[in-house]
Image (spheres, rainbow, N blue to C red):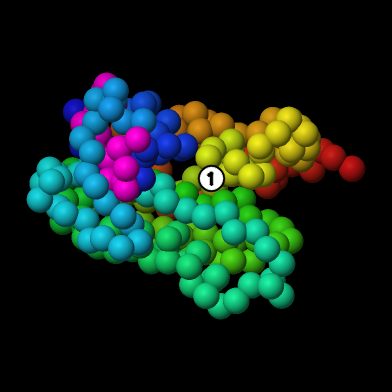
Amino acid sequence: MKNILLIGGSYGIGLAIAKELQYENKVFIASRTNENLTDLHITHIPFDALNDTLDTSQLPEVIDGLVYCPGSINLRPFRGLKPESFEADMQINFISLVKVIQTILPNLTASNQSSIVLFSSVAASMGMPFHTSVAAAKGAIEGFAKALAAEYAPKIRVNVIAPSLTDTPLADKFLNNDVKKEKSAERHPLKRVGTSDDMAQMASFLLSEKSSWISGQIFHVDGGMSTLLVNG
């Protein structure tokens, strides 16, 4: 069984990943709360990505997989964004991620071949209005992932999932009624909004031996939005 660490996992995509992995792996979840986790076969570690240093004494010496889930959806006109907004988005999406990886790097390199899975956004590759702050933070993740994958190959594989808008608690204000969901679905060539399970299945694949020859890639799990022009 592999040892898999999820940073964030009590709801949304992280919770879906935990449910996907729990029976065939030893899953550790480091998150602020253990809400929704009591019935899962996981080990919970209290951890706030913004304020805490991860306690490695609660982790196994070998970590075979890491998934970093914390993120933000801060959509506002550029003229109304202060530098502090960019700093906040960069902190939760990227800087805290860097700190986690540096903290557990010895555990990751102790594995025969570990896998890191990160989350970006379709907005990092497509120009979208009101996405300047989140696109900047997610763009940092994509560049970082490729460089890290190169530096630690073949010992550590690093890949990124770049979703479009996904039906999670983080995106609730954009999908909190049927009209919003229908409009969002229509924007995608596959005519539906993404789900946490869509992302969990891709993450599970990237953590598994089935993807052992894949590293440094950005996977657009976005209903075709980033590559298919079928509307208009």
Secondary structure of residue under mark 1:
helix
Residue 209 image-quadrant placement: top left
x 77%, y 34%: residue: 179
Q: How many marks?
A: 1
Q: Which residues are magenta?
A: 22-35
Picture coordinates of residue 23 (x, y %)?
A: 27, 21
Evaluate whether residue 213 shows in this view.
no
102 relative to 205 in the view: left or right: left
Q: Quadrant of the C terminus?
A: top right
The residue under the point 49% across, 72% down is 87
Residue drawn where x is 39% and y is 34% of the image: 15
In this rendering, would 115 be left or right of 104?
right
Compared with residue 42, is residue 217 higher up or lower down, i.e. above or below? below
Direction from residue 81 to residue 68 in the image, left or right: left
Query: Residue 127: where, in percent of width, then height?
Result: 71, 60
- Left or right of 174? Residue 206 is left
* Residue 87 showing in the rendered view: yes
Compared with 210, 58 (above or below) is below
Q: Is residue 26 magenta?
A: yes
Q: State the residue at coordinates (27%, 51%).
A: 47
Q: Nearer the viewer, residue 121 or 111?
A: 121
Q: Amino acid at mark 1?
A: Leu
